[in-house]
């Protein structure tokens, strides 16, 4: 006789003892003991935190952490203020101001990075279009960006996409309307931030997110071999008992 409307949940290896499994079960006590046996120096974790604060531009937090932990940053904290001023200018749409500040910091940043230079000028064009300065936008595109596009195919394609915004009265219907989103400003600001950090011989990306990605990858690999207490909430790093 067939039974409709009911489907039983699959049994786990523990509920189905005759089903063999090659996975090892590691208890919470054993796992915590293994973790405690790993020697991680406080100085290393402090440097990891300082690296994140400096790279992301949290000046006040970095200074406070320096005083509390005795961890010195690898760059002058005063330079972070200048870098954040550039980033804020781009995020606010004040691209000309941002370019001036970058050149004040180090004129070689833009001189040696044609892609960044173009993207900043492209962002200037986007801001002109956003503000309805159509004639000025067309003139700027022709005089400043078109010559760069003639020398670089990628630049030309980006220019054509940006100018396409002018063909739509309702930019929400434009295939490249996302260029006017705040996310485009953030993307350009992030590129400038990375270039400034590189010019200061500092990593352009913080190390902490990479460490967390490595943790997730390691857990995914271990999931195939064992049942063990996992970290499911990275913000609290609390362990959850193995689900078997």
Image (cartoon, rainbow, N blue to C red):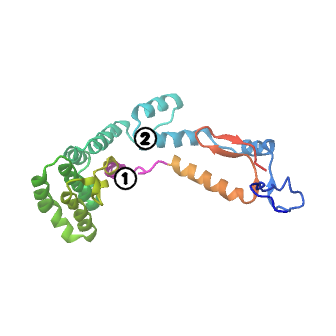
Q: Name the residue under label 2.
A: 54
Q: Is residue 108 something one can see in this rendering?
A: no
Q: Is residue 237 above or below residue 69?
A: below
Please report whichever mark, 1 or 2, sits nearer to the chain's N-terminal start. Answer: 2
Q: In this view, does 45 lie to the left or right of 34?
A: left
Look at the image and give the residue range highlighted in magenta: 186-206
Tell me where residue 4 appears, x and y as whole percent: 76, 58
Q: What element carries label 1?
A: helix
Where, by quadrant of the figure, is residue 41 drawn? top right
Tell me where residue 137 appears, x and y as whole percent: 14, 54
Q: In this view, does 203 lie above or below 50?
A: below
Badge 1 density bin: few <14, some 14–19, many ≥20, Cα 10 Å: some
At 25% from the left edge and 65% from the top edge, which residue is drawn? 155
Real-space CA distance between mark 1 and mark 2, rounded to the nearest whole angstrom: 13 Å
Q: Is residue 75 above or below residue 221?
A: above
Tell me where residue 191 appears, x and y as whole percent: 34, 53
Front residue of 174 and 86: 174
């Amino acid at each position: 006789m067939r039974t409709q409307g009911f489907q039983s949940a699959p049994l786990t290896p523990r509920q189905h003892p005759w089903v063999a499994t090659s996975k090892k079960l590691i208890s919470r006590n054993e796992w915590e003991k293994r973790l405690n046996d790993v020697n991680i120096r406080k100085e290393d974790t402090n440097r990891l935190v300082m690296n994140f604060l400096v790279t992301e531009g949290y000046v006040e937090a970095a200074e406070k952490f320096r005083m509390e932990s005795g961890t010195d940053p690898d760059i002058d904290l005063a330079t972070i203020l200048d870098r954040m001023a550039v980033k804020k200018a781009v995020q606010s749409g004040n691209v000309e101001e941002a370019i001036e500040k970058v050149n004040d910091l180090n004129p070689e940043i833009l001189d040696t990075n044609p892609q960044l230079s173009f993207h900043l000028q492209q962002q200037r064009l986007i801001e002109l279009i956003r503000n309805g300065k159509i004639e000025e936008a067309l003139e700027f595109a022709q005089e400043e960006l078109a010559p760069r596009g003639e020398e670089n195919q990628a630049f030309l394609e980006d220019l054509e996409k940006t100018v396409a915004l002018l063909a739509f009265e309702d930019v929400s219907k434009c295939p490249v309307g996302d260029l006017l989103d705040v996310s485009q400003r953030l993307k350009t600001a992030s590129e400038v931030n990375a270039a400034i950090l590189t010019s200061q011989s500092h990593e352009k990306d913080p190390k902490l997110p990479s460490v967390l990605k490595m943790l997730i990858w390691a857990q995914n690999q271990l999931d195939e071999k064992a049942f063990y207490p996992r970290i499911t909430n990275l913000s609290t790093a609390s362990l959850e008992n193995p689900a078997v």
